[in-house]
Image (cartoon, rainbow, N blue to C red):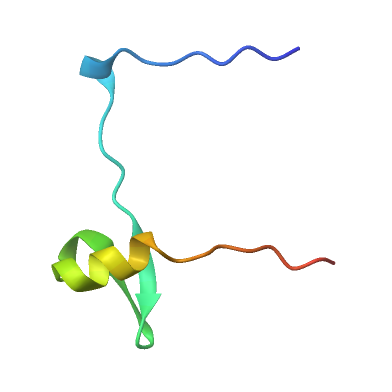
Amino acid sequence: MSQCNTLPTEQRQRCEVWTRVMGYHRPVSAFNPGKQSEHRERQHFSEPR
């Protein structure tokens, strides 16, 4: 059985998320509010092997 340890809030740091848009990679934080909203609504999937 594995146990998950979490850090206290003051020791955590934000993770910068990058995504591929229009042929190049950009940080999601650089998107305009509309594009950030669109990114949050995306559905992720896994292809079977």
**44 and 19: which one is in front?**
44
Please report the residue visible at 63 percent of the width from the left and 12 percent of the height from the top.
Answer: 3
**Spot occupied by residue 20 in the image (x, y as percentages of width and height):** 39, 75
How many marks the image carries: the answer is 0
Figure quadrant of the N terminus: top right
31 vs 9: above or below: below
Query: From the viewer's perspective, is 41 left or right of 13?
Result: right
Residue at the right extreme? Answer: 49
**Splitting the image into 4 quarters, where does residue 36 fall?**
bottom left
**Spot occupied by residue 7 in the image (x, y as percentages of width and height):** 37, 15
**Splitting the image into 4 quarters, where does residue 33 fall?**
bottom left
Is there any visible trace of residue 27 in the rendered image?
no
**24 and 48: which one is in front?**
48
42 vs 9: above or below: below
Is there any visible trace of residue 1 in the rendered image?
yes
**Splitting the image into 4 quarters, where does residue 49 fall?**
bottom right
23 vs 43: above or below: below
Please report the residue visible at 26 percent of the width from the left and 63 percent of the height from the top.
Answer: 28
Please report the residue visible at 26 percent of the width from the left and 17 percent of the height from the top.
Answer: 9
Query: From the viewer's perspective, is 22 left or right of 46?
Result: left
**Spot occupied by residue 4 in the image (x, y as percentages of width and height):** 56, 16
